[in-house]
Image: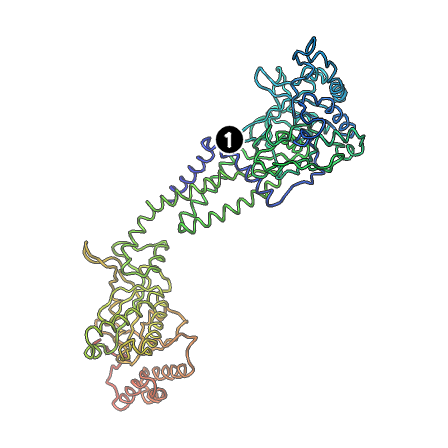
Amino acid sequence: MRDTLAVSAIALVCAAALVSPLFEKAHGLSIDILTLSRWEMFGPRHDPATSPVAVVALDEETYLTAPFEGSPTSTWTGEIARVLSAVLEGGASVVGFDIVFERSIEQSEIPFGDGTFGEHIRGFDRDFLRALAEAASAGKVVLGEELRGNQPILPAPGQRIAVHHQQNIRPLNVYTDSDEIIRRLPLSFVVGGNKTPGMALELASRSIGKQPDTHEDGQITLDGYPIPGALPNTMTLNFDGGSDDIPTYSFADLRQCASNGEKDYFRREFEGKVVLIGAVQDQEDRRLTSKRFATRTEAARRPRCALPERSIGGRFEHGSIAGVYIHATAIGNLIRKDAAREFPRPQVFVIAALFALLSAALARTLKPSGAAAAFVGGAGAYLGAATFAFGHALVLPLIEPIGAGLAALIATTGYRFAITDKERRLLQRSFAYYLAPHVIDKMLASNKPPQLGGETREVTVLFSDIAGFSEIAEQLAPDALMRLTNTYLSAMTDIIESFGGYVDKYIGDSVVAIFGAPVDDVQHAASAARAALGCNARLAELNREANAFAGHTISQRIGINSGPALVGNFGSQRRFNYSVMSDAVNLASRLEGANRFYGTTIIASETTVALAGAEFAWRELDTVRVKGRTQALKIHELVAFASELAPAQRTAMADYAAGLAHWRAQQFERAASRFERAAAHDEPSALFCDRARAAAKDAPMAGWEPVRSLLEK
């Protein structure tokens, strides 16, 4: 519970921090990344030919083409009038100026002759002003202005008069985030005390013939479309990637096209579209937007009308875009009704908190490398889902949840190392010298780690010993004996630990192993039986290896017993050992010794047999009473895995079972007959055959019971 609360608190704090104003500058980065990701994964969303907006670019080519080359833009008004008229005659729904011509050459006060230069060229702007007036009367032209407190940048006075002042002039101002990136556009402004739509909203509404509506809650709708925006009175721009999304025409080419009277071209390219006239140059009016990672080299890319395409040297890809494309994008979003929809801050916090909680849970349950890999995979999957959602104009936050998740992952890993795993490290140090590493890992992964001290558990004890070890010891030098013993004990230990057993102690050549502690194992009896068969098989391999036992053939005896036992750390305060204390250990030792009387290798108690199950082939050997116990118990030989039992073994076991039944019924002659069938190759059968014949010859005394007392090991 403590760790759960701590990890939850870490996740919530990380989420709150990432959503707080402290990381405000990183908030908009989500839109930037999604714009790039969507462009790279899906390409353009729309065919440029279907765009509802087009740009007439005062571009580098125009500045290098006659008659504009070397001429200031204030002298271009007549040619602008020619193109404006041609575009409107071609069927454009409305034309907006994304460039402000705040000075007229007619206003020049430079001395010239006996007057000023402006006086000598009165009427120079007549064609331009006439074109503006005609378009303004039809509601098909909007001039731009830039609001700057008490000193706005306005069109020249003659232009303002021509378009009926504020009736056809709209602000071009944009909204810049705290990181100096443009991701949003204001929808309206207060000009002269009156609320006025921005350029993009004005042009879009004129194009579709619908006026925007402002509701009591401040929500602005256009033709029934609630314009989304994370900030009041703004819309979030939904940029496409690349440079072909907004059809762009070089002003120089259109001017020549208009001079040639190519009306069909204008009708084909501009009918029904909103047209923006603005600067598209490599240096001037460049803006960083949420498209900054997905830009491409800009150029006039629509089919030419009159002039051949001109190669402009020095073009390169910018991170910024020309300012005219900001309003062009906004107009397209409004007409198509696909402006980007951001989540409000409370919902961003919820998403970030969920991501952080998941990351913290990974760090809490997995190893650091596994948690990191899972986090990277989850972040990648989330980015894919967010990119797909952005394809439908929905902005899922990226930086907040992924940042919160990463912070929670690191913080939880630190918490786990400093606090949670402190106890685990203590256990690892405590068990490192007497538990196999994989057993330690399994113990620590379990929900019930061993108690330091003692606890009662159901366990199975395996006791093994080398047969005739004393005789072997007499024949070997001490160092050779040590090598033999270490080889044997190492091999048997590896087998025992591979089946989840814990080697409690070595007593000379004997091994005492526990199954079911310190690691819980509900199949502890079966695990011990598997280990016993594995030890037998491994010993046979070692006996076949010429140098394993210095030419000696080793055999072993194994006793297995199951029952309750006290397990834990026993010893003094300065030195202790994890061990087991129980009568089950003593009985396992007695059963190991019983193998000597029956000529067997593995004997188990009836308790172990009942717990181990049908996976093994067991032969009931006898009923015995061991030293120190008054109660008789049935003992069984572990012959093999049931699936590996040979036909001859199966026949011998059947004859033995029948003989044992006759023995217990005091039918000694019949018992001897059945035991005799396998006596030539089976020591337990030979033993009972002799016992049955002896009993048939000398009838047992009154009160005889079929129980053998094993008074010594």
Q: Quadrant of the N terminus?
A: top left
Residue 164 lies left or right of residue 3; in this view the side is right
Q: Residue at x 59, y 32 (%)?
A: 236
Amino acid type for the residue under numbered disc 1: Asp
Work out whether 638 lies above or below 575: below
Q: Quadrant of the C terminus?
A: bottom left
The residue singled out by tag 1 in the image is 179
Work out whether 347 lies above or below 587: above
Residue 644 appears at what percent x and percent y?
42, 76
Work out whether 473 lies above or below 323: below
The quadrant in which residue 484 appears is bottom left
**Residue at the far front in the pictured view:** 113
For label 1, count other residues whose C-alpha is less than 10 Å away and answer few (under 14), some (14-19) or many (20+): few
Q: Pick whichever, 206 or 619, lies toward us.
A: 206
Residue 99 lies left or right of residue 561; in this view the side is right
* Residue 403 seen in the current view: yes
Residue 125 appears at what percent x and percent y?
73, 18
The quadrant in which residue 673 appears is bottom left
* Residue 711 seen in the current view: no
Q: Pick whichever, 659 or 105, lies toward us.
A: 105
